Image: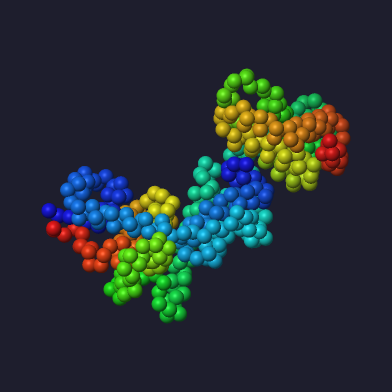
Amino acid sequence: MRHVTEEELFQYREGDQKGREAVAAHLGECAECRGELARLEAVFAALDAIPVPDPGEDYGARVWRQIAPRLPEKGPRWWEVFFAPQRLAVAGALAALVIVAFYAGRVTKQPLPAPVDLAKQNQVRERVLIVAVGEHLGKSEMVLVELSNAQPASGQKLINIAAEQRRAENLVEENRLYRQTALEGGDKAMVSTLDELERVLLDVANSPDAVTPAQFESIQKRIAEHGILLKVRVVRQELRTAETGGKSQPAQTDSTAKEKNKA
Amino acid sequence: MSDAVAVERTLAGDREAYRVLVERHSAFVYRLAYRMTGNKEDAEEVVQEAFLRAYQKLRQFAGNANFATWVYRIAANYAIDRLRQRKNEDARRELPPRVVEGEPETDPLALVKDRAPSPEQLAGSVQLAAKMKEALGTLTPAERTAIVMRHWDGCGIEEIAAVLKSNSSAAKNTVFRAVQKLRLALAPFVEPRGAARAVGTES
């Protein structure tokens, strides 16, 4: 009778299906091969006997202290910002708004003085952006309000937030584009609000589809924690004022945002 | 904060979010690094380098993947490169290699058999662990990586093949070769001398 080879024993131990039945049958009859298998097992047992020194509870913190000074700054790259599909969609929507605004201007203000006033064009662009950001904040506010106001029925084990989650996912993408635009425009207050909004939206987007009442409460707490809803509402109000012809200078947005942050 | 959220925030420029990932997974990566390198200093260096590289490559990280598995693989890749580099350095300095191939004069069995204590003497697991550690040092970088990933971390053959940059069949053979060498090296300690038979022969 042929004994099984070391490799066959190893493959058998690994759970290989090839020739498995024959090896098993042989092992059932042959004490010598069973001994070989036991010796193979002893090798793995010996591997397990090698201790790994405990690096200590604060090891993670130590690693961080060592690598933190060597980490380069990270931020979205400009081409990623502009060419990501989701962002292209938003950019397309913006472009459409610009065209609509342009034609609306032509229709309502004919005849146009020639040559076209550059300052006015900039104003139109700014207005379009204000409208778009306002809409984005409105949609975000709606998701957050819905989550904040929802009251799970008593005894309900799981709350389905899949719809809010999907909406939050889309809003995260939009939010990044507007944040980037605000960053380039030097509007620090807007950047800060959009930053905070992004964190909350990400929290929602990355939650499971169905959450327990405790998890749901924790989401609500996170929304309430930094008063993000209030901040969003204040910025929206500012944008509405700017949209309806009020002053919309970035410096003013900055200062009002400081007030809002104090709140 | 979940790993996925931490990755998103890091990509958005929030360094503190990366801190969460580092603090959460360092010990896990350290265990792999220690088993691969066999000493604390090298293991710590592997861990630091793995997290630095992971940060630099974070944009390549697929959002639906597991961050721990991803950084683990980066650490394994770096550790195997380091083992190979060290082997080459040793060769250049004409030091006796820390890692030996299956040539007659560097047979793992030959390395230990002259100093082999009796099984009784080696009953304590501390001694056995020390002998096993010594035997692990005789494996090639690829064999060591393969056995560490397979035995301790239960990695699949495909995953091992990816780190070894080989195919599944070759990776499987590498694991087997590692086991075979370790078995030979430990033979004097896990069985009475001369008791081993040539497996695969007729009885």
* Position of residue A42 in the picture relative to residue A174 (left or right): left
Residue at 64% across, 61% down = A66
* Position of residue A216 in the picture relative to residue A225 (left or right): left
Q: How is the image coloured?
A: rainbow
* Position of residue B30 in the picture relative to residue A150 (left or right): left
Asked if residue B173 can be seen in this view, the reply is no
* Position of residue B29 in the picture relative to residue A178 (left or right): left
In x, y percent, where is residue B123? 36, 62
In x, y percent, where is residue B72? 50, 53
Q: Residue furthest front?
A: B120
Please state which of residues B30 and A79 is positioned toward the viewer in this rendering. B30
In x, y percent, where is residue A131? 75, 31
Please state which of residues A193 and A98 is positioned toward the viewer in this rendering. A193
Residue A89 quadrant: top right
Asked if residue B152 can be seen in this view, the reply is yes
In x, y percent, where is residue B77? 47, 59
How many numbered marks are there? 0
Seen in the picture, residue B148 relative to A112 is either above or below; the reply is below
Please state which of residues A232 and A243 is positioned toward the viewer in this rendering. A232
Residue at 25% across, 56% down = A36
Point out the image quarter for the C terminus of chain B. Answer: bottom left
Please state which of residues B54 and A3 is positioned toward the viewer in this rendering. A3
Residue at 40% across, 65% down = B127
Q: Residue furthest bottom?
A: B94
Residue at 37% across, 56% down = A45
Point out the image quarter for the N terminus of chain B. Answer: top right
